Amino acid sequence: MSEYQYYEFRAVDRPLGKAQLKRLRDLSTRAAISTTSFVNTYQWGDFKGDPDRLMEQMFDAFLYFANWGTRRFDLRLPNGLASLTRIKAYCAGPFVEVRVHGPSLILEFHAEEVYDEYLDGEEEDWMGSLLPLREGLLRGDYRCLYLAWLRCVQEEEVEDDQLEPPLPPGLAEDSESLSAFSSFFEIDHDLIGAAAAASAPAPSGPSRKGIAAWVESIPGGEKDALLCAAACGELPALGAELLRRFHADKLPAMGRKERPADRRTAARRRFKKCNSGCSRRPVEQFKCGNCAGFLGGRMIAKGVSEKFGGPGRVRTVDLLHAMEARSQLRHRPQRNDYFV
């Protein structure tokens, strides 16, 4: 099989200048280059540029995959709009890393040996599906980071005694970009389902009337400074900055605050009791009829969905057991299987 590599860079906050376009053209004569993107594929040879340097100097997003199983997705975020401390809480293994470069944070998701699905960059718009995650992060939506942490659990990169990071609300809700993220990196959907069972509903967004009232309350000098910074290109993500300030003033932070008493580790024994008084490991609870319930149209033990979850509560081994329970229930023999 011949090799196949796909490179795509995207500029979001500001278009590329003439000097930057010339630099990109020097790297490749075949690439599709515009003021906002660079796209190229390789069936032989390799890319002459350095993706890390290009992300630091020009672009806000980078997508790469190869037919030998390597997949990578990077995002550059303004340091003032994203919390380095909160992001680091989800960086549990080599799959997800964050680094600081000047005024920016660069978030990298990198997986090797992912073979379950053949990807075609020319027919599938992976970048278009994944890019909304950047805006979500700037607005404080860390669900993709939690999924990244789950993949670290899936790949056994997380120690049993490591505590779960904050569980974001809305993990069980439909999202095209989160679905694309989990598909691109082959994150087990049973593991996601087991974790999402404890996720609170996402808070509703602010109304236009509420934002208008808040904008009126901003001192005039501060408004002028924001508008001048935006006009001079110093604050390209003005909308995200205003929403960040609005949420800081008006709405509680995403995710629940964890209590020290709730922080448990995977080293402790994992036995739960259902309402009928049975005592089983989570992976065995599907055998108890009183424990059985439905989650998203799938059978799942209530003991898993109700008693697992929350910051510091879902332990790595607990999640794997819950995932196994969901998987066994989802693949259990059906009546029609016996009549073929």
Image (cartoon, rainbow, N blue to C red):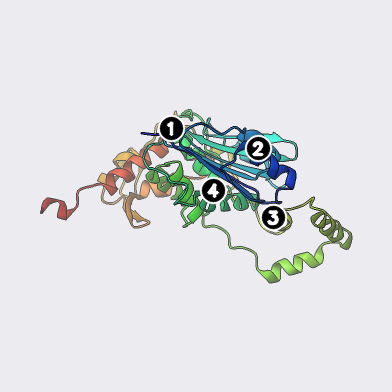
Which of labels 2 and 3 is toward the front? 2
Determine whether, in the image, residue 180 is placed left or right of residue 217: left
Query: Dot 2: within a 10 Å radius of its alpha carbon, few (fewer than 14), some, or many (20 or more) residues?
Result: few
Residue at the spot of label 1: 155
Return the disc, 4 or 3, that comes first in the chain's sequence. Answer: 4
Return the disc, 3 or 1, that comes first in the chain's sequence. Answer: 1
Q: Secondary structure at mark 2?
A: helix
Asked whether the beta carbons under mark 2 and mark 1 sit within 8 Å of each other, the answer is: no
Q: Secondary structure at mark 3?
A: helix
Residue at the spot of label 2: 26
Residue 65 position, x and y percent, is 48, 39
Q: How far apart are labels 2 and 1 at the CA level?
A: 39 Å
Q: Amino acid at mark 1?
A: Glu
Residue at the spot of label 4: 143
The foreground one among 184 and 156 is 184
Residue at the spot of label 3: 240
Q: Amino acid at mark 2?
A: Asp
Return the disc, 4 or 2, that comes first in the chain's sequence. Answer: 2
Q: Amino acid at mark 4?
A: Arg
Q: Is residue 194 above or below residue 248?
A: above
Return the disc, 2 or 3, that comes first in the chain's sequence. Answer: 2
Asked whether the beta carbons under mark 4 and mark 1 sit within 8 Å of each other, the answer is: no
Q: Is residue 328 visible?
A: yes
Return the disc, 2 or 1, that comes first in the chain's sequence. Answer: 2
Q: Quadrant of the N terminus?
A: top left
Which of labels 4 and 2 is toward the front? 2
Q: Secondary structure at mark 1?
A: loop
The foreground one among 25 and 150 is 25
Which of labels 2 and 1 is toward the front? 2
